[in-house]
């Protein structure tokens, strides 16, 4: 059974950047529903028993039933994406990455600020609901992209693995920022936990 990541901080700990009510609703309602729906769908596909969410999302085509495939794509994506999102933000976030990730960002984008600009643009320009991603392949090459709905790079191109995602579904920001998505994206950088993102980067390239 898949479980929501346990938060290491309180619902109000990310204020003023992300408000308490948004966090309660986002985690306790939206994320919880994706998790419950994923578990219900996976139970109907015995061949998925024991597989990780990453394996499932990379191999959706093995699910013969199109209705179940769609349910697992949507809810599995929602489960995975939100686990990543909540694990890479922190009340102690902000600033810039360090170490190998900082070095690679500068190599691939020119500077941390240029990477931030590209990822922010991907988030702001995503039409409708979706996500913007900073991902890496196993060789350490970084990539910025965006996905509709609850899709992610594992579904779209399994050679890239997300290490940071900006949720631009309205439920992630509308209670505080209304229709001002750019303001939310700007505020998001104040809560990014670069230590957590760096650990994910190191884990991926370590194989």
Image: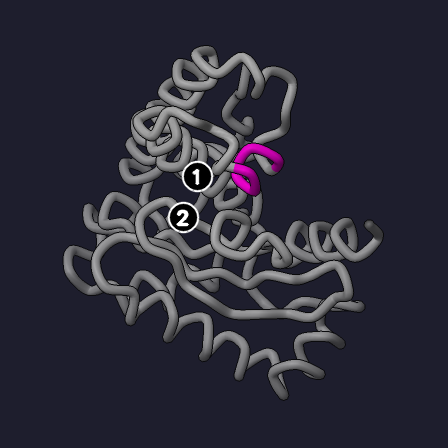
Please state which of residues 40 and 48 is positioned toward the viewer in this rendering: 48
- Closer to the camera in the image, 194 or 19: 194
Q: Residue at x 54, y 77 (%)?
A: 115
Residue 24 visible, this orientation = no
Q: Are marks 2 and 1 in contact (CB under 8 Å)?
A: yes
* Most distant residue in the bottom direction: 110
Q: Secondary structure at mark 2?
A: loop
Q: Is residue 41 above or below residue 148?
A: above
Report if residue 143 is visible in the image.
Answer: yes
Task: Give the CA separation, mark 2 to mark 1.
Answer: 6 Å
Judged from this view, the residue extending furthest toward the left is: 179
Q: Earlier in the sequence, mark 2 or mark 1?
A: 1
Residue 45, how many percent across, how many down? 48, 16
Task: Indicate yes or no whether the magenta region holds residue 150.
Answer: no
- Residue in front for this viewpoint, 5 or 13: 5
Residue 99 placement, left or right of 173: right
> Residue 205 appears at what percent x and percent y?
79, 57
Residue at numbered disc 1: 77
Residue 148, picture quadrant? bottom left
Q: Mark 1: which secondary structure? A: helix
The verdict on residue 57 being magenta is: yes
- Disc 2 target residue: 151
**Residue positioned 42% across, 56% down in the render:** 166
Which residue is found at the position 57% from the left and 21% from the top?
48
Q: Main secondary structure of the magenta part?
A: helix
- The magenta segment is 55-59
**55 left or right, relative to 68:** right
Residue situated furthest front in the rendering: 64
Classed neighbour count for the residue bearing mark 1: other residues with Cα under 10 Å, few (<14), some (14–19), many (≥20): many
């Amino acid at each position: 059974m898949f479980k929501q990541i346990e938060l290491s901080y309180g619902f109000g700990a990310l204020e003023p950047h992300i408000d308490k009510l948004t966090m309660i609703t986002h985690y306790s309602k939206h994320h919880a529903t994706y998790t419950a729906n994923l578990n219900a769908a996976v139970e109907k596909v015995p061949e998925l028993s024991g597989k990780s969410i990453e394996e499932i999302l990379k191999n959706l085509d093995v699910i013969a039933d199109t209705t179940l495939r769609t349910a697992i794509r949507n809810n599995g994506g929602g489960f995975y994406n939100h686990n990543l999102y909540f694990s890479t933000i922190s009340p102690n976030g902000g600033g810039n990455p360090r170490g190998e990730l900082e070095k690679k960002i500068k190599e691939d984008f020119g500077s941390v600020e240029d990477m931030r600009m590209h990822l922010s643009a991907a988030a702001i320009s995503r039409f409708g609901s979706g996500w913007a991603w900073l991902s890496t392949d196993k060789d350490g090459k970084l990539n910025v992209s965006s996905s509709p709905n609850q899709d992610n790079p594992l579904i779209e191109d399994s050679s890239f693995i997300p290490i940071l995602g900006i949720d631009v579904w309205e439920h992630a920001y509308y209670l505080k920022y209304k229709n001002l998505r750019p303001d939310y994206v700007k505020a998001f950088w104040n809560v990014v936990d670069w230590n957590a993102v760096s650990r994910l980067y190191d884990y991926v390239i370590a194989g």
